Image (tube, grey):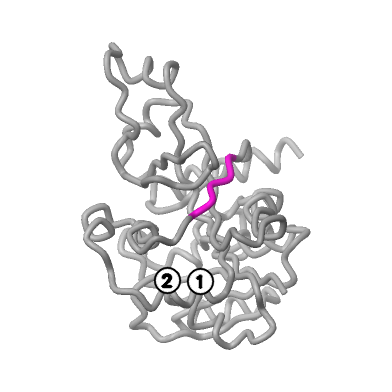
Amino acid sequence: MIIGIIPARFASTRLKGKPLKDIGGKPMLQHTWENAKKSKLLSDVVIAVDDERVYEVARRFGARVEMTPKDLETGSDRIAYVAKKLFSSEIIVNIQGDEPFIPGKMIDEAIEPLLFDKNVAISTLAKRITNVDELNSPNIPKVVFDYNNFALYFSRSPIPYVREVASDKQKLLVADIYKHIGLYVYRKEYLLEFTSLKQTDLEKYEKLEQLRMLENHMPIKVVVTEHESMSVDTEDDLEMARLYYQRQRENF
């Protein structure tokens, strides 16, 4: 079985109570769950929570919910905690709870490499950067990958460095530069192995846990997508999400 797990942490540092923030009359978490359910490859979607308030709200809108300890450090740890209980699951998909408009097709794109190639154990998504703000934002991780689409490095800095260009805009014209979209697909045993490992130096420097995988020789397949998603980390992001949802409803 292929199970999607949405980690939902109430005490977000930059936006407390983030999973319950209202977007068009629904909590953000409900939007994420409803869109994840549109995936054609997921057998089920489970929400992993650390707070009774989030638990009750998720139950009310019909989700399958699992409570996890508050002291788990990351969303990956929360997912691994739930995955251990899902004995029939073979593939686990980490769907970020703060991406309320993630298309089901995007989730399926990330899953496909594990279905078609038994040698692929972990996959994720990337999208080409087309504007300078995304290029320079430390909140948008970047990824470089080899000719077989396996990740070489992730960074909050613009990578690759492009020499002999006059401007950031020209960088985007000269080179293909990709942002990382934080959706991961794991064969279950690799998720459990990854979350059992200690944090690594590069992970601590960049504050990117996927570097722990690379530093421990765990290959990550990168799927380039044309679909877009919107991550909500701050109040400004939340307002943009509300405006986006309103426009979508008006154009429907």
The residue type indicated by label 1 comes to Tyr
The residue nearer to you, when weighing 150 against 64, is 150
Question: Which quadrant of the structure image shows residue 217?
Answer: bottom left
Marks 2 & 1, CB-CB < 8 Å contact:
yes
Where residue 169 appears, as percent x and y from the top left, is 37, 17
Instruction: Give the answer, above or below, for where 20 lies relative to 202.
Output: below
**Label ID, residue 194:** 2
Q: Is residue 223 magenta?
A: yes
Q: Residue at x 48, y 26 (%)?
A: 130
Where residue 121 appears, as percent x and y from the top left, is 56, 63
Q: Helix, strand, or loop for circle 1? A: helix
Q: Residue at x 28, y 57 (%)?
A: 207
Where residue 151 appears, as percent x and y from the top left, is 45, 47
Q: Which residues are magenta?
A: 220-224
Viewed as shown, does residue 26 lie left or right of 10?
right
- Circle 1 residues within 10 Å: few <14, some 14–19, many ≥20: some
Inter-mark Cα distance, 2 to 1: 6 Å
**Label ID, residue 190:** 1
Instruction: Give the answer, above or below, for where 16 lies relative to 108.
Output: below
Q: Residue at x 34, y 34 (%)?
A: 159
